[in-house]
Image (cartoon, grey):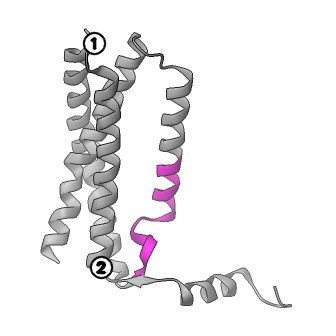
Amino acid sequence: MRTGETFDSVINNLRRFAPRVGTRAQLIAAALMWLIGASILLTRGIGYVHDHHWHAWTLAAGLALGVTKSRLLLDHVGRREVTRIRLRGHSFALGFFSVKAWGLIAVMMSGGILLRQLVVHPNQIGAGILGAVYIGVGSALLLADRIFWKAVLAS
């Protein structure tokens, strides 16, 4: 850095060169991100529970968890992110989620990986429990993703 140059000026210079997109593109990116996350979690969850005697209660528990989490938490998060994207307008392409949201995504992914490595062993009840959690979180993301898609269609 040159003498007298502040961190803020460096960030502002970087922002000038960052790819920028419109509101609709940001909403589509956010909706696709939630859809991809939901698909990965649901695929993993179903993979843990298929062909096992605990699959029926696991699916039921996971779906109940998903509906509850979607209604109580993720619908609100989705509406807040849609509002934030609309207020930002034409902006940085990866800014469709806030820095806090990206951090939360990283923490949740790391937690899932850690949990999978420490707790889950094939053909044991831990796999069924993790399957229920994955199905619950995946179905919650899938249900709440409608907030983003409605915003895309309305823009």
Does the residue at mark 1 contact the one at mark 2 (Cβ under 8 Å)? no
Residue 74 at what x, y percent from top left? 29, 48
Residue 16 at what x, y percent from top left? 55, 90
| 10 sits to left or right of 38 | right
Quadrant of image for the N terminus: bottom right
Residue at (39%, 12%) from the top-left corner?
123
Residue 142 at what x, y percent from top left? 23, 47
Tell me the residue that label 1 is attached to: 52
Query: Where are the magenta residues, as a range?
Result: 91-106
Whether 83 is among the magenta residues is no
Residue at (17%, 78%) from the top-left corner?
155
- The one of 91 and 77 positioned closer to us in this rendering: 91
- How many numbered callouts? 2
Q: Residue furthest front?
A: 51
In three-dimensional space, the C-alpha distance between marks 1 and 2, rounded to whole angstroms, equals 45 Å
Amino acid at pointer 2: Thr
* Lower sequence index among marks 1 and 2: 2
Tell me the residue that label 2 is attached to: 23
Secondary structure type for disc 2: helix
- The one of 109 and 52 positioned closer to us in this rendering: 52
Secondary structure type for disc 1: loop
Whether 101 is among the magenta residues is yes
> Principal SS element in the magenta part?
helix
Residue 80 against residue 125 in the figure, above or below? below
Residue at (32%, 27%) from the top-left corner?
47
Residue 45 against residue 9 in the figure, above or below? above
Amino acid at pointer 1: His
Q: Residue furthest right?
A: 3
Crowding at label 1, few (<14), some or many (≥20) Cα neighbours within 10 Å?
Answer: some
Residue 30 at what x, y percent from top left? 33, 63
Find residue 27 and report its image quarter: bottom left
Crowding at label 2, few (<14), some or many (≥20) Cα neighbours within 10 Å?
Answer: many
